[in-house]
């Protein structure tokens, strides 16, 4: 009898282990650099991935074109990318042809567009950008078209009429372009925007303030992978959602992790950055996608996408079934 009880307890423990996610496998994640990766760092530092049984490998990309190529080459299982990139590829409006069938979708949110428009020291206002060149990641998607919209709304400047744009890649590449005088303005992520501000560069606009509700980034996977590894993705999404919650609820932990990964931040800068991360345009609470924010993305894409067309429906780019199962199982 004692042996049967012991065996029964062992089986119960095994069942609990499987439910908690300990049988999940490895997930290879590719993102852009910057402080908006705080929930990813938090998920690793505080053991949220480990508790769900996920072995996460995490890398950063040099740009969205390279990111999509690596994603479709099977090097990564999940990407964190501008939501607009997904729409652009779905609608045939991207800088490069999609290297395969359109089978990717956003399953949970990242942040609401926490980026700033930075300009070189000699640029005093929007009028000074006229006739010059701006740097973007990709010409036809992501924060490139966000930049075009801000320049139009705030400065009355029209893309390809009043200024030119060059595609150079991620935030660091855009900063290099400005330092090398190839461009006078760019959308820059944090904390790099703080670093260049110390060099004398000027912030003209906060993207989140100018655009309102905007789905900046999302976590994206491909349908064949999701069909095969749904459980792994559920465990991943659960860990990320818990990490997002932890960032909002535990300021001291968040700032500690920020300063560990975003090197060189002063205490004041870390405090400022944390407030931005949990404020408007910052991290999506619990990692939930914001439908209203997606409407803004689609509206801007309808203005700048080539060929011009009506976007949507949202279900073409988003499927939250994995996320819904993840948060329901918390």
Image (cartoon, helix red, strand yellow):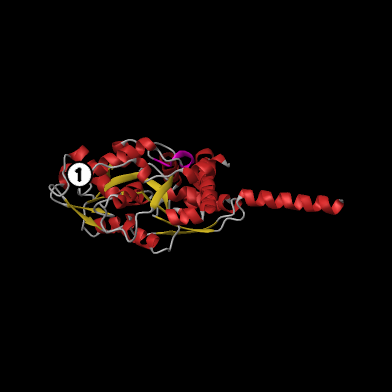
Quadrant placement of the C terminus: top right
Q: Is residue 228 left or right of residue 95?
A: right
The residue sitting at 21% across, 38% down in the picture is 153
Quadrant hosting residue 127 = top left
Q: Which residues are magenta?
A: 282-287
Residue 63, x across and y down, in percent: 33, 58
Quadrant hosting residue 126 = top left
Q: Secondary structure at mark 1?
A: loop
Residue 288, x across and y down, in percent: 45, 40
Residue 192, x across and y down, in percent: 36, 51
For disc 1, the neighbor class at 10 Å (few under 14, some 14 to 19, many from 20) is few
Q: Is residue 181 above or below residue 39?
A: below
Q: Nearer the viewer, residue 5 or 239?
A: 5
The number of numbered discs placed on residues in the rendered structure image is 1
Residue 37 shows in this picture:
yes
Q: Is residue 280 above or below residue 170?
A: above
Can residue 93 be found in the magenta stretch?
no
Q: Is residue 311 left or right of residue 123?
A: right
Q: Is residue 89 left or right of residue 183?
A: right
The residue sitting at 50% across, 52% down in the picture is 41
Quadrant hosting residue 263 = bottom left
Determine which residue is flagged by label 1.
124
The residue sitting at 55% across, 50% down in the picture is 235
Q: Nearer the viewer, residue 154 or 253?
A: 154
Residue 214 shows in this picture:
no
């Amino acid at each position: 009898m004692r042996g049967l009880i012991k065996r029964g307890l062992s089986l119960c423990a095994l069942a609990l282990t499987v439910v908690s996610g300990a049988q999940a496998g490895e997930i290879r994640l590719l993102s852009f650099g910057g402080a908006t990766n705080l929930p990813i760092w938090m998920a690793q530092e505080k053991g949220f991935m480990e508790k769900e049984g996920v072995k996460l490998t995490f890398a950063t990309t040099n740009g969205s074109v390279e990111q999509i190529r690596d994603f479709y080459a099977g090097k990564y299982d999940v990407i964190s990318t501008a939501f607009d990139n997904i729409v652009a590829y779905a609608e045939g409006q991207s800088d490069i042809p999609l290297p395969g069938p359109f089978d990717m979708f956003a399953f949970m949110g990242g942040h609401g567009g926490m980026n700033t428009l930075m300009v070189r020291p000699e640029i005093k206002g929007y009028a000074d950008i006229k006739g010059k060149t701006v740097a973007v990641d990709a010409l036809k998607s992501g924060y490139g078209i966000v930049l075009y919209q801000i320049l139009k709304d705030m400065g009355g400047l029209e893309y390809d009429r009043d200024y030119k744009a060059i595609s150079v890649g991620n935030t660091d590449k855009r900063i290099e372009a400005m330092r090398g005088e190839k461009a006078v303005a760019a959308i820059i992520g944090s904390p790099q925007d703080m670093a260049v501000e110390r060099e004398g560069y000027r912030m003209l606009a906060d993207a989140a303030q100018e655009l309102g509700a905007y789905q900046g980034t999302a976590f994206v996977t491909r349908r064949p992978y999701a069909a095969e590894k749904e459980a792994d993705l559920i465990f991943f999404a659960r860990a990320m959602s818990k990490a997002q919650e932890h960032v909002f609820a535990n300021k001291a932990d968040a700032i500690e992790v920020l300063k560990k990964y975003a090197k060189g931040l002063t205490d004041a800068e870390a405090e400022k950055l944390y407030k931005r991360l949990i404020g408007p345009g910052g991290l999506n609470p619990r990692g939930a996608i914001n439908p209203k924010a997606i409407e803004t993305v689609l509206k801007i894409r309808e203005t700048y996408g080539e060929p011009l067309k009506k976007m949507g429906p949202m279900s073409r780019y988003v499927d939250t079934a994995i996320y819904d199962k993840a948060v329901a199982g918390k």
